[in-house]
Image: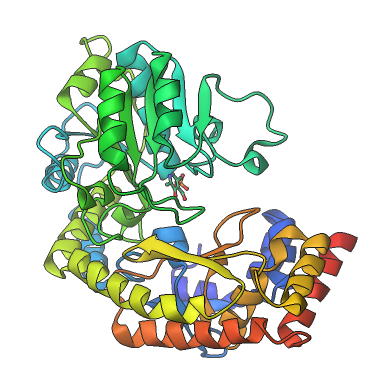
Amino acid sequence: MHNDFRAWLDQHRGRGFDLHQKHINPAFVKMLRAIGFDRDYVRGEGCYLWDEQGNKYLDLLTGWGVFALGRNHPKIKSVLKQLLDLDRPNLVRMDCGLLSGLVAEALTRHTTDQLSRVFFTNSGTESVEAAIKFARCVTGRQDIIYCDHAFHGLTLGSLSINGADFFRERFGELVPGGRKIPFNDLAALEKELSGRCAAAFFVEPVQGKSCEVVADGYLAEAQRLCRKHGTLLVLDEVQCGLGRTGKWFCFQHWPDIEPDILCVAKALSGGFVPVGAVITTPRIMDGVFNSLERCVIHSNTFGQNDMAMATALATLQVIEEDKLVENAAAMGDYVMQKLRPIAEGCPFVSAVRGKGLMFGIDFARPRSSLKLKMAWDMLHRLNFGVFGQMIIIPLLDKHHILTQVAGYHTEVIKFLPPMIITTQDLDWFLSAVDDVLADTQRVPGAAWDTVTGLAKRAMLA
Ligand SMILES: Cc1ncc(COP(=O)(O)O)c(C=O)c1O
């Protein structure tokens, strides 16, 4: 082991792609190379990344929502450095650690009175898995209702309530009892609930894959129906929670919502240490852990570890002190107001939607212009998912903005800016989108040549 970690890393500079090709995931390497995303990022700070050549990029992908505070936030770094020097008795297991207690106290300060109990996890999907178990345990029911296009993670339980067939194919039989309904459809929800077999209804207030937002009044009625039929309402705020949408929790945009279980993760990590949490009521927690014998009936080895807890505590403090929820609300309004007219001027845009700093542009076959319709049809005959590359490739290549298509077999490009973002950086983004959308309308043109080539290569592969 090298004593000088930086020198050790420098010695191996530039080997990342080859190592991944050999030892990790060659298909992913191939995909990155195909779309020109094979860049070596060497530094991250705040909203930005820098590559080896010193180019600066605006990061609107934020590690799939992890870097809500931006990268390498100095306050979190300072707490972690101090923690390492404290030689604390981490993960004793047969004790009640102070740090996890403090995080639970800080986290529940921002929820409703009833949501006062916390189970710590190591990821979003683990939060969802725990919520599935808790709901089944306390209701004595098996079924889980979930939405079309839902994404709750990719372990078996979460995958069983994934709203896209693509993710489920070829993984065999999943956890039984999943019942899919259309998003924002109360009649379909009531129909499923009325069978009185559902332990829980899982829903993301803003869907990560589609950027669809629950309609006004939807959660209140879903909550009323769930209570009437003895089903728990579980809100998956792994992506939209902790300030991103302009409220501490997204459900707080609507009055009188009190989920039975709330799942969080991503942003709680401060971008440093994996951590998630299931926030729920005493009734549910006491229903699961209902005797001394069952006091650790659901647990994990690394949950509540000091690194994760210190990071989560510091993260919650930064969000509060730096008024990042307020900034997310203001910047979300700013960008939406300006993005809508830009995007709606492009015939390929079918919708701009989202909440706060979680928003996307949805694309569809244009209604006007025969030439554009023919170009769209030709590309989709070659490959369904490639249109989005016409947006994300020039955003990175020409404008140095990192984004991604939101999901497989969707035409949504999603943006998850850090909650520290400023109007100046949003203006950088807005002018880039304006330029890229204009290029899509030049048929024939360089943008179409690039994606047609990509689609042909994908077909041959
Ligand atoms: C809403 C939602 N739930 C759950 C998950 C799974 O989280 P993780 O990847 O940490 O397991 C995600 C991840 O993107 C998510 O967006």
Q: What residue sits 79% from the left and 72% below the top?
A: 374
**Quarter of the view holding residue 226:** top left
Question: With respect to residue 246, does 185 lie above or below?
Answer: above
Decide which of 157, 166 is in the foreground and name it.
166
Q: Quadrant of the C terminus?
A: bottom right
Residue at far right of view: 460
Decide which of 36, 243 is in the foreground and name it.
243
Q: How is the image coloured?
A: rainbow
Residue 326, x across and y down, in percent: 18, 68
Question: With respect to residue 455, does 91 lie above or below?
Answer: above
Residue 420 visible somewhere in the drawing: no
Left or right: where does residue 155 sit relative to residue 375?
left
Residue 77, x across and y down, in percent: 27, 67
Q: What residue sits 53% from the left and 77% below the top?
A: 41
Residue 294, x across and y down, in percent: 28, 12
**Quarter of the view holding residue 128:** top left
Left or right: where does residue 80 sit relative to residue 44?
left
Decide which of 379, 341 is in the foreground and name it.
341
Q: What residue sits 9% from the left and 36% below the top?
A: 113
Residue 190 visible somewhere in the drawing: yes
Question: With respect to residue 192, does 182 lie above or below?
Answer: below
In this figure, what is the number of numbered marks? Answer: 0
Left or right: where does residue 440 sit relative to residue 105?
right
Residue 248, x across and y down, in percent: 21, 54
Question: With respect to residue 1, does 148 lie above or below?
Answer: above
Decide which of 166, 354 is in the foreground and name it.
354
